[in-house]
Amino acid sequence: MPTRSPWQIRGDLHVHAQHTICDSHKSGDPVEYGQTCGVGAIEEMRSYLSKREYEYLAIVNHATNPLAPEPPTASSEKLVREHKDIIERVRNEAGPTGPVLLAGVEASLLASGDVDVTKETLCSLSVVIASRHGNSTEWRMDETLRRLQHLFVHCPVNILGHPTRYVVPATLPQYRQLLQLCTEFEIAFELNLRNPFGAELITSIVRSGVLISLGSDIHGNMIREQTIASGSLSSIPVIRQLQQQRFPASRVINTWPLERLLRWLEERRIMCHT
């Protein structure tokens, strides 16, 4: 049996199927939320990414419109629960073949310091990504840091989504503060694979001790457009940047076996049991 490289990527932890937007949405387009497009969209994404021989995929959605996120409502909470049920159904019907599907959400940070999903619903999911969307992209970094600290204390967040995207220009010292906050709470700092990263930021990441999550942020329409390059994530430039600076592969959570990943995800849910 060939030896597994420590940098072998076992899964993608930021995947959007067509469960809320359904067809041709592109970044910046207005979208209609409140509908679930069903099992077919999840199966399609699972089949497409199975070609990369992943062990697991975290399929996440937006609970409310990310262009204008709102506090959770009965309707938005129902949508997240339906998304979870669909993923679990597809996972159970697929059996042991192909990647294991993990149900999650990409929650949007609100001005209150909370997100657009209730803590109760977050606690029912396997993977929780918190990201800046909508008006939060205009916040100063010091405001963002205060709100994220509040969120990390009170909610079972696992991953800070695309932290160098949808932000006003931030200084390197501010990013170092953000890295320190993620390290303190053991939140994985996501490197979104469709966005560039400066060498100085990569150096700060390497020195910080933070965990890294890799996510394609692929959406259903990208399957048809083929905008995400095929092949292993290890061919992505940002991974080469990390390797060149001798970043330990063990700090990239996508390299972990599923059992270890699930244990780490569960550790953030200790607050759900109190």
Image (cartoon, helix red, strand yellow):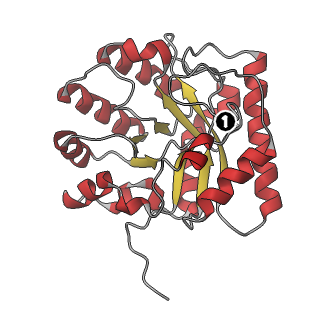
Horizontal and vertical percent position of residue 232: 44, 63
Q: Is residue 274 visible?
A: no
User: The disc labelled 1 sits on which kind of residue?
Assistant: His
Residue 135 vertical position relative to residue 121 in the rendered view, above or below: above
Q: Position of residue 103 (x, y in %)?
A: 67, 44
Instruction: Report which quarter residue 167 is drawn in.
Output: top left
Find the residue positioned furthest to the bottom.
Answer: 1
Residue linked to disc 1: 273
Disc 1 is placed on an element classified as helix
User: In the picture, residue 199 is in which quadrant?
Assistant: top left
- Residue 22 is situated, as x and y percent measured from the top left of the image, at 70, 35
> Relative to 104, is 157 on the left or the right?
left
Q: Which one is nearer the viewer's eye here, 112 or 45?
A: 45
Residue at figure coordinates x 49%, y 10% from the top left: 111
**In the rendered image of this protein, does residue 169 appear above or below residue 37?**
above
Query: Can residue 91 be seen by looking at this rendering?
Result: yes
Who's the residue at 68% across and 39% down the image?
A: 18
Q: Residue at x 37, y 36 (%)?
A: 182
- Quadrant housing the C terminus: top right
- The image shows a total of numbered marks equal to 1
Q: Is residue 77 left or right of residue 5?
A: right
Horizontal side of 105 relative to 109 (left or right) equals right
- Taking the image as shown, residue 161 lies to the left or right of residue 143, namely right
The vertical placement of 195 against 136, above or below, is below
